[in-house]
Image: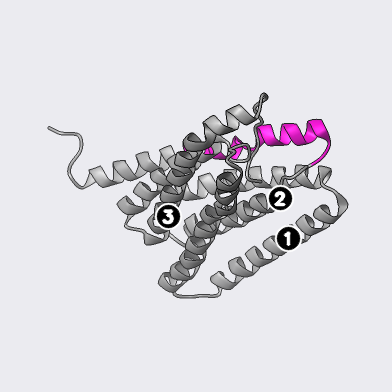
Amino acid sequence: MSLFNASSIPIVGKDAAGIAGNIFAFGLFVSPIPTFRRIIRNGSTEMFSGLPYIYSLMNCLICLWYGTPLISPDNLLVTTVNSIGAAFQLVYIVLFLMYAEKRRKVRTLGLLLAVLGVFVIILVGSLQIADSTVRRMFVGFLSCASLISMFASPLFIIKLVIRTRSVEFMPFYLSLSTFLMSVSFFLYGLLSEDPFIYVPNGIGTILGMVQLLLYFYYKRSSDQDSTEPLIASYG
C-alpha cells in the first residue's frame, strides 16, 4: 500500500519547494557579508548604497505579515524566510549607518524610519479589515508589488554591467541565490495556487536568469581588467 496518495503530492511538493526556498534565501541573506567586511576594513561605504537593504527590509516585513495566519493560512515557510531576512537586513542597515558619510547616513536613517512607519500603517490598517478574504487580497497585493520592486531593483546594476563590461558589483553567488530562491518560491506559489507568491517570483526567476547570463558573458572581461577580484554587491 502506498504511503502517499495523489492528493498528498502537491502538499509534499509545496513543502519541499518552500524548504528549498528558505535554504537558498539564506544564501541570499548572507551574500552581502563580504561586502560589509570590505566596508569595515576600509572604514567607508565607498560606492555602495544602503537602498537595497532598505528595500529588502520593507519587502521582508510585508511578506512576513502576509505569511502569518492572520492574513493567509498554511504559509509558515513564507513567514520563517522573511523573519530571518528582516533580521539580516536590520543588521546590514545598522552597519551601513555606522560607516556611511553623514549625508548618506541621514538619508538612510530617514528611509529606515519611513519604512518602519509605513509597515506599521499597513499592519494596523489591514487588521481593521473584518473580511478575511479582502484582508488577504489587500496585503497580498502589497506583498506582490513589494517583491516585484525588490526583484527589479538590480536593473540599474544590469545596466552598469553592460556599460562597464564588468561584473565587480554583481557577484555570482548573490545572483545565483536570487535565481534559486525565486524558482523555489515560484513552484511553492504554483503548488499553493497563490498568485501573490508565484507571479512576483516568476518575474524574479526571469531577472535572476538574466543576471546569471550577463555574469558569465562579462566575467572574462572583468578578469582581464582586474588582477585582484573584488567581492561586492549591488548594495
Q: Is residue 230 magenta?
A: no
Task: Check disc 3 and report the residue beneath it.
Answer: 203
- Residue at the spot 30% in from the left edge and 46% down from the top edge: 11
Name the foreground residue: 96 vs 20.
Answer: 96
- Residue at the spot 62% in from the left edge and 57% down from the top edge: 58
Number of residues whose C-alpha sits closer than 10 Å to that of mark 2, classed few (under 14), some (14–19) or many (20 or more): many
Residue 190, above or below 114: above
Residue 60: where, in percent of width, then height?
57, 53
The type of residue carrying mark 3 is Ile
The type of residue carrying mark 1 is Leu
Residue 224, above or below 46: above
The type of residue carrying mark 2 is Gly
- Residue at the spot 60% in from the left edge and 36% down from the top edge: 31
**Left or right side of 38 for 193:** left
Residue 224: where, in percent of width, then height?
60, 27
Task: Check disc 1 and report the residue beneath it.
Answer: 111
Task: Check disc 2 and report the residue beneath it.
Answer: 50
For label 1, the SS is helix
- Residue at the spot 52% in from the left edge and 66% down from the top edge: 142
Are dots 1 and 2 in contact, CB under 8 Å? Answer: yes
* Magenta stretch in the rendered image: 22-44
